[in-house]
Amino acid sequence: MSRAQAESVIKNIIREIAQQCASRGQAVSETLVAFMVKAVVLDPTNDFSTDKTLTRDDVQKLIKLCVDKLMDTKSPSLDTIKMQVFFDMNYTARREFLEEHHRIMKSRLMPVMREITDSRARTRDELDSLYRKIVSAVLLQSGLGSPTDINVVREATAALQSVFPQSELGAFMQMPRKDKERHLQELTAIVSGIRLFNKDCGKGGEGIDDLPSFLNEGIPATTHSLDEEIGRVQETAAQYAALIESLAVKAQKPGADVGLSLELLRESLINCRQAEVFLKVLLSDVIRSADQVEQLMQQLQARLEQLQNTVQSKTAVPTAQVYPQFVHLSEIWSGFQDEMVLLSVLTNILNNLDAFSRVHRDLFKPDIVAPFLEEAGEVRSDQQRLEASSDPAERVNPADFRDREWLFPETTKNYSRLPVMYRGYCAWALVVFDRLLIPGNPSVGILHYRNNYFIFSSRKAAYEFANQPDEFIASVANAARRSPELIQILELHSQFAALTPHSQSRDAGKMIEKPVTKCDAQTETDTHFMDTNIVKSYEWNEWELRRKAIKLANLRTKVTHSQQTNLSNLRRDNVAQVYPPKDQETQTKRDGHTSVPKPSVFYAGLRGMGMSEPTDVDKLDLTVPVEQQVLGSNNGRPS
């Protein structure tokens, strides 16, 4: 089956599950359904294999199991999954939330800004209408009052006219669109600063809310609510942990009736731990917001005092001095607005989280669990557990292990910042007591095994885990398959990549550690790249060209032209070391000659034979041949 076909099948399954739940009166989101489908497939008790294609019967079985789980109204596990999905879809890190908020506000104001920048007003009525639109845009951008309030509009118009009179509309119309948008931003900042300064002086500020006062009241109230909720959740978790420990021991006896469902107790404890994690995330954001508000308050007070000193008892102030201060004042107020929006979102998430913890509170009401708590004995909080295990006698002795590496505070740098596994919960308790979430104590010692760090609640837990670490790690993974909500709580996304939450891709490392994912990728390179054609020796500065020309002119007057460089041409006394010539002799060829035979010819009969007979002349060649001459010379005889 191709990837596209598999995705189509999954979408059809999710759609079918959502429709069946809706027909039963329970509306569920597709995100929750998708999470539940993956959770059901991962559960080994359901006998689904990810290596084979689902048959028609497998699909029907998967749909039925998911619908049954989603329709279970008394399942703390389902509440935990809903809580995780809700938080994942609604919570955003501070920086990303503010960036998204600014982007949305800008997109909403874009039609108004475009109407101003694209205007082609010519008549007086059209110019008046354009000016009113600019006033409305300034009010909408600044958020300082409603454009429908006549008093706010009058004050904003007066402030705008002192900065941008209507007579300058002609020059504004001639600007390019980008310059118009930038000019409107500057006008908004300056006008907002003027109105804020007038509010501080008691001469204006119509429609401007006192955001610093609201924040000074809202942040402590939200912090107090979060502290109370965290305390209540921790107290409930401590009770559930004590009941699980007590009833688990009792259940081991044959024929024993524990009276309460251990499975529901474990699911309820997981729900409390997840709520505690989310509440602490919200609390850290609120504390950071409080610090930011305190800094903004200091900046606001300093800026207002500086503006008072600048404009005090002066009829006219240079714009170069006062306008930048108004812009800075507007930026400070924008910071207050951001903190107000962020606090509102965090408060809304806090109020909605309580709805995902009602099931276990209804199942285990105080009057129901009170007799079992008395039987269990002392209910220890997380802090009390840590104090009890901080005894030096509970500390691990590294000498008891030969092939295990133990870390301690006095021997390890940044000991408290080590990335411990399972979010700091004891790995031993997760297996021995079946998904019992109790915190580990760093004082006992941290086990470094296969590039992971494990923390434990007691010396006994540490020793038993260290003797069989692989078995315990595999058991924790199996427990997470039976309770998929543990994957996010224990930060096991590297082992279960299919259940990685959406928020992790948006902001890695805020609540959960980013998993390591790999994929096959290919890159394609161009066949022919564009030539840069950059001339390295090009120089645009005429003075640099003149300096180079002087260098070249000086080089022409030097004796050793080929031995000079650009850095040595200004040196007058140049000395070069040479080797003196050596006395050498060469053998040359001597001049020689050879003797050739001397021609010798004898003519006979020149005197004639008498008058009665004709003369007969004979020519005789008496020249000695070369061979005889050489041979004769070699024999020592004359030729």
Image (cartoon, grey):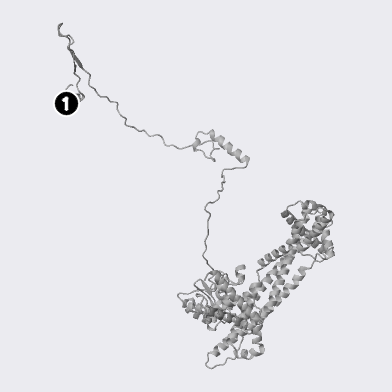
Is any part of residue 87 visible from this angle? yes
> Is 53 above or below relative to 633?
below
Question: In the picture provided, is 252 more to the left or to the right than 215?
Answer: left
Is any part of residue 274 visible from this angle? no
Rendering coords of residue 617 (x, y %): 18, 13
> Is 490 above or below relative to 631?
below
Q: Quadrant of the C terminus?
A: top left
Q: In the picture, residue 548 is in which quadrant?
A: top right
Rendering coords of residue 163 (x, y %): 80, 55
Q: In the picture, residue 409 is in which quadrant?
A: bottom right
- For image coordinates 16% across by 26% down, the residue present is 635
Name the kind of residue labelled 1 in the image. Answer: Asn
Q: In the picture, residue 107 is in which quadrant?
A: bottom right
Check the image and name the residue furthest to the bottom. Answer: 255
- The 10 Å Cα crowd at callout 1, few under 14, some 14 to 19, many 20 or more, is few
Rendering coords of residue 296 (x, y %): 73, 65
Q: How many marks do you count on the picture?
A: 1
> Is 22 above or below relative to 611?
below
Rendering coords of residue 73 (x, y %): 64, 84
Question: In the picture provided, is 279 more to the left or to the right than 479?
Answer: right
Q: Kindly state the secondary structure of the residue where label 1 is placed.
A: loop
> Is 159 above or below relative to 414?
above
Disc 1: which residue: 635
Check the image and name the residue furthest to the top. Answer: 611
Of residues 190 and 522, the one drawn nearer to the viewer in this rendering: 522
Question: In the picture provided, is 32 more to the left or to the right than 119?
Answer: left
Of residues 406 and 525, the one drawn nearer to the viewer in this rendering: 525
- For image coordinates 57% across by 92% down, the residue present is 257
Of residues 631 and 366, the one drawn nearer to the viewer in this rendering: 631
Of residues 147 and 277, the one drawn nearer to the viewer in this rendering: 147
